Amino acid sequence: MSYDEGLAQRMRAQLGPLPGLTEKKMFGGIAFLLCGNMACGIHGNDLSVRVGPQRYQSALAQAHARPFDLTGRPMSGWIAVQPQGYEADHDLTWIGQAAAFARSLAAK
């Protein structure tokens, strides 16, 4: 499975030069980690976003968001955003939310 390199570039621009930022190819896509904690990524055509347990339900209520599910069991605190939900650059506010949550976790 490949991922959209254009979207990856847009995500890199949103994340900027954050300390501890790394990229890793995973699940047939790409993941962005902060201090060893996954924050967001691309899986297929979807943007995967780690919002955390407290913001999970409100994030699911947003347009074009659904549970992030790779195995038939949704990942707790993660959502998938369909392409219509990240078409414009201002739609990428998801990335900042993911980065904020990942930075709130202890470094690995």
Image: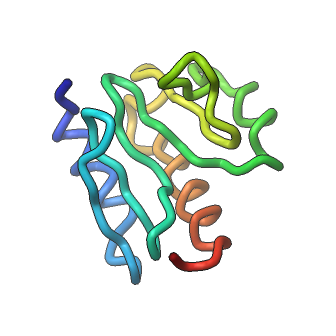
Q: At which x and y percent is residue 45?
A: 33, 23
Name which residue lies at 69% across and 43% down: 77
Eyeballing the image, is 55 above or below 80?
below
Q: At which x and y percent is residue 46?
A: 40, 27
Instruction: Report whether 34 appears left or right of 45.
Output: right
Name which residue lies at 27% across and 56% down: 24
Name which residue lies at 20% across and 24% down: 1
Instruction: Count numbered badges in the picture.
Output: 0
Query: Which one is nearer the viewer's eye here, 75 or 102?
Result: 75
Q: At which x and y percent is residue 26?
A: 30, 44
Instruction: Report whether 91 appears left or right of 23.
Output: right
The structure's colour scheme is rainbow
Eyeballing the image, is 100 above or below 19?
above
Query: Which one is nearer the viewer's eye here, 17 or 37?
Result: 37
Instruction: Report whether 85 appears left or right of 6.
Output: right
Q: At which x and y percent is residue 101?
A: 64, 62
What is the residue that sits farthest to the bottom in this orientation? 19
Query: Which one is nearer the viewer's eye here, 46 or 16?
Result: 46
Name which residue lies at 78% across and 47% down: 53
Classify residue 44 by image quadrant.
top left
What is the residue that sits farthest to the top in this orientation? 72
